[in-house]
Image (cartoon, rainbow, N blue to C red):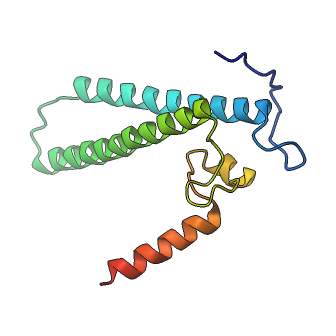
Amino acid sequence: MKQEAFLPDDYRPAEDEPFMNDRQVEYFRRKLLDWKAELLAGSRDTIETLQDGTRNIPDVTDRASEETDRALELRTRDRARKLVGKIDAALRRIDEGEFGYCSVTGDPISLKRLDARPIATMSLEAQERHERRERVHRDD
């Protein structure tokens, strides 16, 4: 296992340093791990709430409202579950040395894009082309 790079608390990747150097890789690894921990903690809270929140509500309207709230929470948690899978895939790309490079063109993904969306697999240009093609084919 590779030794962790020293990373000051206020570190932000900069365009003037070598792309995906040890500090940038460590920055994104920590960002992804923190995001994953936050999502998993939210899932645990949801499970506890759903287990504790089972009540017999006599009013039909109140019961329907609570069921709607639960359904919304479960949909949100399902999205979080899928996001955890994408985070795990990004962490694997870090381990394999492929993180930060577009899966279509092989070009570096901008640091701004990676900072905003560290699970990104395509550069902004490749993503836009992909979405345009998707819209065209969806209309068929």
- The quadrant the N terminus occupies is top right
Q: Quadrant of residue 22?
A: top right
Q: Residue furthest bottom?
A: 140
- Residue occupying the point 46% across, 42% down: 86
Q: Looking at the picture, how far across and down is residue 117, in whole percent?
A: 60, 49
- Left or right: 98, with 26 as reference point: left
- Left or right: 62, with 101 as reference point: left
Q: Looking at the picture, how far across and down is residue 76, in whole percent?
A: 36, 45
Q: Nearer the viewer, residue 114 or 39?
A: 114
Q: Quadrant of residue 25?
A: top right
Q: Quadrant of residue 26?
A: top right
- Left or right: 38, with 123 as reference point: left
Q: Nearer the viewer, residue 17 or 103?
A: 103
Q: Looking at the picture, how far across and down is residue 48, in whole percent?
A: 31, 23
- Residue occupying the point 85% across, 45% down: 14
Please say if 136 is above or below 108. below
How many marks the image carries: the answer is 0
Please say if 79 is above or below 92. below
- Residue occupying the point 49% across, 77% down: 132
- The quadrant the C terminus occupies is bottom left
Q: Nearer the viewer, residue 117 or 4?
A: 4
Please say if 124 is above or below 44. below
